Image (cartoon, grey):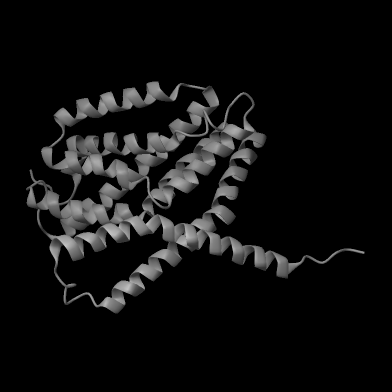
Amino acid sequence: MLKRPCYAENSMDLVVSLARQLKDSLRDLAPVVLVIAFFQLVVIRQPLPDTLALLDLVLGLIFVVVGLTLFIKGLELGLFPLGENLARAFVKKGSVSWLLTFAFALGFGSTVAEPALIAIADRAADVVAQGGLISQSTNAQASFAFALRMVVAVSVGAAVMVGVVRILKGWPLHLIIIAGYVLVLLLTLLAPAEMVGIAYDSGGVTTSTITVPLVTALGVGLATAIKGRSPMLDGFGLIALASVMPIIFVLLFGIMGIHLIPGAAS
């Protein structure tokens, strides 16, 4: 006689796991809240702005804690296992071309959806317009922001592809990273000054909430599935590549591609 799945036990385990994750989220956010509260109450010694009600502040903190808890638990339940299983499936399939295509699509898709990148692209468009590289029209700034997002997304896709090839070939990570940053330093000397800071910050915004879990799961799953590769030594490092590659691409965009933006300064 077949046993029915015990949904009550599974639900209870999930509730206990969420409670533990909620406690961890509170612990992780507590230093940030304490620092802000200290400077607001002790250093600045000013009341909250009129536009920020105390109730809104409390609700915002609650939403952050609950959202972070659900997000991390969602990664553990779904995205991490899915990414690792896909990597193993591609290895068993034996198709390098499909694996590289998936790696590029994963890096590109996760980066395009990155909220931090959307925010910095809009702000960067305003700064570049003030610097005179493009006109201050709405269309020119929107075109620049969209182009910047696409450049960064393509760069992360390319970085994940390079990382997958590195895992397959067993190339040393540190040599690739050193070569990447040497190229960054050279391109920095040639790029417009207004684009240098944007390029460097673009490398940071891509390693945020969406990109990191998916790319990490791919690297660890791939290193686990390939004989002779260590998940500890070979599975990590994709995030480092995804940090340096956007800097290179955005600097190149500032040198060669920004003139193609509608409304660019002649």
124 over 250 or under it: above or below: below
User: Is residue 239 rendered to the left or right of residue 49?
Assistant: right
User: Is residue 251 rendered to the left or right of residue 100?
Assistant: left
Residue extending furthest toward the front: 42
- Closer-to-camera residue (230/35): 35
Percent of width and height locating residue 233: 52, 28
Q: Quadrant of residue 12?
A: bottom right
The residue at the point 55 percent across, 49 percent down is 80
- Closer-to-camera residue (160/236): 236
Count of labels in the image: 0
- Closer-to-camera residue (183/78): 78
Quarter that holds the C terminus: top left
Residue 95 in view (yes/no): no
The residue at the point 60 percent across, 66 percent down is 15
107 over 34 or under it: above or below: above
Quarter that holds the N terminus: bottom right
The residue at the point 42 percent across, 48 percent down is 211
Percent of width and height locating residue 216: 49, 41
Percent of width and height locating residue 81: 60, 49
Percent of width and height locating residue 121: 24, 52
The residue at the point 78 percent across, 65 percent down is 5
Q: Quadrant of residue 260?
A: top left
